[in-house]
Amino acid sequence: MIAPKTLKLSLKSLRDFAKKRLPDETLIELDERDECPLDIVRYMCDPDRLGIQLLFIPEEYGGLGGGAFDVYCICEEMARIDLGIATAVLATFLGSDPITVGASPEQKKHWLSRIASEGLLFAYGATEPEAGSDLGALKTTADPVLQEGRVAGYKINGNKQWISNGGIADAYTVLANTPAGPSWFVVEKDTKGFTHDEPENKHGIRLSNTAALAFNDVYVDADRLLGGVEGQGLNQAQAVFGYTRLMVAAFGLGAGWAALDRAIPYSTKRIQAGAPLSEKQGYTHKLIVPHVLRLEAARSYIEETAERIDAGEGSLNTEGAIAKYMASEAGNAAAEASIQALGGYGYTHEYMVEKISRDVRITTIYEGTSEIMEMTISRDRWQLHLKTRGQYYHEQAQKLEQVHSGCPEVGAEIAALASHALAEVMERARTGRLTRYQHVLLRLGELISYAECAGSLVRRAARLAEGKLNEKANRRFDAAALAVLSRAFAREAAFKVAEEGLRLVAGSGGATDAEMAALETSLRLPAIHRAQAGLIADMDFIADVLYNRAEKNAARAA
Ligand SMILES: Cc1cc2nc3c(=O)[nH]c(=O)nc-3n(C[C@H](O)[C@H](O)[C@H](O)COP(=O)(O)OP(=O)(O)OC[C@H]3O[C@@H](n4cnc5c(N)ncnc54)[C@H](O)[C@@H]3O)c2cc1C
């Protein structure tokens, strides 16, 4: 783990560098020219300059040994600068993951030391033209080449699609089918038979290079098979999902905030109907505040998951999926709302929110689409629901009720209502066998994510109030503001879980007319409706915090 002071310094160097070398005009120009600024990417990965990659390389290989929390902080900061450049720089992290997880000690030493000391750029080659979400369908092959009865190397044949850094990387980790199943190989850029296409002309992240790769009888020595054992590739890919999805979650978070941080100051200066837009409740409470709630709910889930990964709780794939799903969806919604918040100006290139909105769009697609996240989340939590005989989310709710008794202002009792309602919806889904409908299964993934993020934000707000928040945690909001944010998001989550859950159950034939009243009671709908009291006042408070209208807060508190 990196010391908080070192992390702070790294983040500051990154911000200073971006201010100097990547002002808006430069970013807009590069975006229009559809150009990946390779010199900038190389500078950022140069160990004698910014050396961003050092943060995630273990110390024994010459890096700083950053953990999941450090990587989240860096990814958020990078995304605030430019998501294309962030993708290019962090693709090395992704590309080296199969090495970190699956390589032999000699392979790790060789490749990770080179990434640290030479700033090698890596690319991660998993996706194929016909194998995207379903990686099991991959067609690229790696056939053993025998010499004197032993495997001396492999011949790789096939194609990869949409590979970040595809046209600029020095080395590639490539997933290919061996006789024993999918396996990871390292292929260097100049290897005979390896070619890449021209960069794709993309909707967003145009400052990143994305290209298709082709392998025609590409020979690699046997020591390029990561881990030295065939057939481990999918497990190795799985083993890092918690971590890598957290990175993309941080991308969504950073880009979403970058858009809002343009909309918020803009609205203080834009006068319409005799007053700044920031004074219009219909504007702030639709275009700004709800997005702040969702982004901060996602942030608390990211921070909690990162802490748990760093504490050695395992790869936490489902939690990584929830973090990615919530943060990327929230980031997209925030960027979209920011265009609206700037009106006609928002629709032009010059004001950047349009570019951010195109850029952040990728976060719900790469590293697993939102729909695949919903499926992953739902399937995993479904198992927990079954194993605990329907008690899992009731138990989570009880824990939140305990938080409420110690810290009554953070909305823990409302987050508990969301969790109780979720348990009831899932139980109805079980008795009615409703998850045979894929739509129900995936929508449950969304409701689970809302309920869990509400719980996480409540815990974060309580920890901040008690002075127990991680030293590296984001501190944009103080304890009073975070308590209000947490309460407001808990209301949204409880309402959504109960009302949409009810709709799903009723809509898929899970409750007869006669059973509806009992279902409504079990969801505690009256309590959830009553918990909405105070919603507008809390949104007013959050708007005042965002716009630094401290005197209003003080008056309200008095
Ligand atoms: C700019 C960019 C950079 C990328 N970088 C990399 C990289 O560096 N390395 C790499 O390996 N890959 C990379 N990818 C690939 C990316 O991970 C895939 O695009 C993604 O996993 C989705 O796969 P697909 O495009 O084949 O879409 P598909 O899997 O065909 O999905 C299309 C749609 O169908 C939905 N869908 C798919 N399966 C199901 C299902 N079973 N049930 C319901 N809905 C479903 C999806 O959610 C999606 O909405 C990149 C992609 C882009 C666009």
Image (cartoon, rainbow, N blue to C red):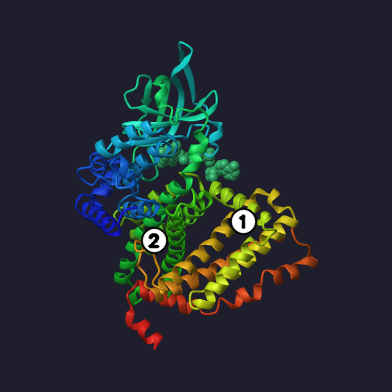
Tag of residue 444: 1
Q: Nearer the viewer, residue 63 or 284?
A: 63
Relative height, residue 359 to residue 182 (above, below): below
At a point 37% along the width and 76% down the height, the residue shown is 544
**Within-10-Å neighbours for mark 1: few <14, some 14–19, many 20+:** many
Residue 231 lies, in percent from the top left, at 52, 29
Marks 2 and 1: which is nearer the front?
A: 1
| Quadrant into which the C terminus falls | bottom left
| CB-based contact (under 8 Å), mark 2 and mark 1 | no
Disc 2 target residue: 338
Relative height, residue 19 to residue 147 (above, below): below
Q: Which of 481 and 183 is in front in this view?
A: 183
State which quadrant residue 449 falls in. bottom right
Q: Which of 439 and 380 is in front in this view?
A: 380
Residue 551 lies, in percent from the top left, at 32, 83
At a point 57% along the width and 73% down the height, the residue shown is 401
Mark 2: which amino acid? Answer: Ser
Residue 414 lies, in percent from the top left, at 56, 72
